[in-house]
């Protein structure tokens, strides 16, 4: 009998630890955390108007700030689907710094990452996107862009796209894949 109870206890512990290493926050938690993390940017959420031929059960929110960073959040109920933050290019140093801070705040809100981990990942992605953008210009591509992505545990993907007119940072949750 004692062996049977030990087996059940071990099974409960083992199955309880099968959650993804980086569980992504729900939309309500993400929204609250982003407002708190980027409070100096005065983050505001508003319902986006979406025109589509297909019926969708997802909700889109426009996110505005008092700095030159805008974003969009897509959710299905409280399930996080996708977050996109954008700035126009060419951007001045202040706008670029605010964009970097907003990206780090979004990573903390979505994944709970600390500032050091966020900065490290974002610095690498920014360098790669800039390098790919320069290579795209040199090749004379029809669509000149630099794109890079990172795949994190738990089915979360991060992306950064840079063009001559804008820069976009994306977090895609497992349900948005």
Image (tube, grey):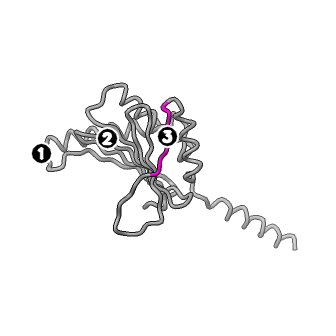
| Farthest right residue in view | 1
Local crowd size for mark 2, using a 10 Å CA cut-off: few (<14), some (14–19), many (≥20) = many
Relative to residue 47, is residue 94 drawn left or right?
left
User: Mark 3 highlights which residue?
Assistant: 44
Which sits earlier in the primary sequence, circle 1 or circle 3? 3
Local crowd size for mark 3, using a 10 Å CA cut-off: few (<14), some (14–19), many (≥20) = some
Relative to residue 15, is residue 24 drawn left or right?
left
Cα–Cα span, label 1 and label 3: 39 Å
Q: Which stretch appears magenta?
A: 41-47
Quadrant location, the N terminus:
bottom right
Local crowd size for mark 1, using a 10 Å CA cut-off: few (<14), some (14–19), many (≥20) = few
User: Mark 1 highlights which residue?
Assistant: 140
**Element type at mark 2:** strand
List x then y, in percent, for residue 84.
Answer: 40, 47
List x then y, in percent, for residue 70.
Answer: 39, 40
* Residue at (47% x, 47% y) in the render: 46
Which sits earlier in the primary sequence, circle 1 or circle 2? 1
Q: Nearer the viewer, residue 65 or 96?
A: 65
């Amino acid at each position: 009998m004692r062996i049977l109870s030990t087996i059940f206890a071990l099974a409960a512990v083992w199955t309880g630890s099968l959650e993804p290493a980086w569980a992504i926050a729900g939309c309500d938690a993400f929204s609250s955390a982003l407002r708190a993390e980027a409070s100096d940017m005065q983050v505001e959420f508003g319902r986006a108007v979406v025109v589509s031929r297909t019926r969708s059960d997802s909700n889109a929110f426009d996110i505005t700030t008092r700095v030159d960073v805008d974003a969009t959040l897509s959710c299905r109920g409280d399930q996080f689907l996708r977050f996109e933050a954008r700035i126009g290019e060419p951007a001045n140093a202040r706008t670029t710094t605010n964009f970097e801070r907003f990206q780090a705040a979004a990573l903390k809100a979505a994944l709970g990452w600390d500032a050091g981990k966020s900065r490290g990942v974002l610095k690498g992605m920014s360098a790669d996107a800039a390098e790919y953008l320069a290579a795209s210009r040199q090749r004379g591509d029809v669509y000149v862009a630099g794109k890079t992505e990172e795949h994190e545990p738990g089915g979360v993907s991060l992306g950064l796209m840079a063009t001559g007119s804008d820069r976009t940072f994306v977090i895609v949750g497992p349900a948005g894949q």
